[in-house]
Image (spheres, rainbow, N blue to C red):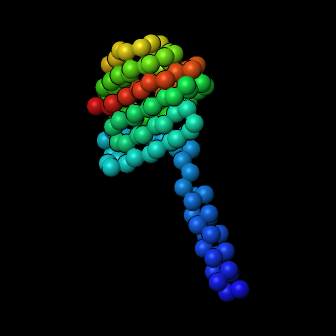
Amino acid sequence: MKRASILFMCIFMSLGILSGCEVYDNSHHSNSSNDKNHMNILEDDDITAVQDDNELEISLNDFKGKKEYKLNLNDNADITVDYKLEKGSLRLTLKDDEGIDTFTAEAYRTHGYTFEVEDKGTYTLIIKGTDVSGKVEIEVD
């Protein structure tokens, strides 16, 4: 009986610890200057995103829908977006903290964009797609 109680307590505590490890879409932040060695990982059935201090790498597998990522950017931040899609297309939109679009692009097959964000602030990167497979890499300089 004592052994069963100890086993039950260990399982219960493990579940409590693991349930606190979930990462939510809105908690993805990148700061191009202050946070170092900072990494978030988000995994769903159709998307995996790895974000550290200056990069966001998104792998898509028959992705359908919309995802948002927060980026804390400095003045005059250069953003490079590279992508290679095996199928489908994506719409990439970057909005400032007031909800104003600062960059929008349609992504098909393979290409890249570089653009500059003039003002420091928290921006939201929104990706929308239907049946998209491939990879998107975003780097902040």
Q: Is residue 42 above or below residue 47?
A: below
98 relative to 16, above or below: above
In the image, 78: left or right of 135? left
**Does residue 75 appear in the picture of this structure?**
no
Q: Could you tell me which quadrant the C terminus lies in?
A: top left
Residue 138 at x, y percent in the picture: 37, 29
Point 56% across, 51% down: residue: 22
Looking at the picture, tell me which residue is in the foreground, 10 or 118: 10
Q: Is residue 10 above or below residue 81?
A: below
Residue 100 location, x and y as percent?
52, 21
Q: Could you tell me if residue 131 is visible in this image?
A: yes
* Quadrant assignment, res 57: top left
The residue drawn where x is 54% and y is 47% is 23
Could you tell me which quadrant the N terminus lies in? bottom right
Q: Residue furthest left?
A: 141
Check the image and report above or below for 113 versus 29: above
Q: Nearer the viewer, residue 47 or 81?
A: 47
Image side of residue 133 versus residue 31, left or right: right
Residue furthest to the bottom in view is 2
Give me the residue at 40% from left, 34% from top.
Answer: 56
Q: Which picture quadrant has residue 67? A: top right
Q: Residue at x 55, y 32 (%)?
A: 46
